[in-house]
Image: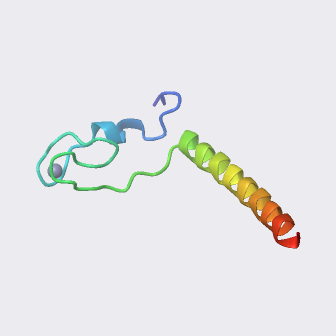
Amino acid sequence: MDKKDGNIYGDFAPSKLHCKRCKTLMEEGVCPTCGYKVYVPMSKEKRDKVKLVSTIVAFVVLIAVFVIIQIVKD
Ligand SMILES: [Zn+2]
């Protein structure tokens, strides 16, 4: 059993899944033909990206709140 690097899905890669309804090859766990969706666990790369984005958003919101407080003070 050898795992490919960066592929946590193994043989069940979402890109290789076929739609249960119309048998179309699915893209990212979504059928381009009928819109059927399957649950696709987030990859580590995606999770890290989401983490980074939420950290940046939280930081920006914090700065925005700080700036607003400063403006309101005047
Ligand atoms: Zn389909």
Residue occupying image coordinates x 32% and y 48%: 29
Image quadrant in which the N terminus is located: top left
- Residue furthest out toward the front: 74
Give the vertical position of 5 relative to 37 (above or below): above
Residue 23 rendering spot, x and y as whole percentages? 13, 45
Tell whether 21 sits left or right of 30. Answer: left
Residue 44 rendering spot, x and y as whole percentages? 57, 42
| Count of marks placed on residues | 0
Image quadrant in which the C terminus is located: bottom right
Residue 18 rendering spot, x and y as whole percentages? 21, 44
Instruction: Please tell me which residue lies in front, 11 or 6.
Output: 6
Instruction: Please tell me which residue lies in front, 39 or 5.
Output: 39
Residue occupying image coordinates x 40% and y 51%: 40
- Residue furthest out toward the bottom: 73
Tell whether 35 sits left or right of 56. Answer: left
Give the vertical position of 48 relative to 7 (above or below): below
- Residue furthest out toward the left: 22
Instruction: Please tell me which residue lies in front, 31 or 13.
Output: 31
Residue occupying image coordinates x 67% and y 46%: 52
Identify the coloring: rainbow
Q: State which quadrant residue 16 falls in.
A: top left
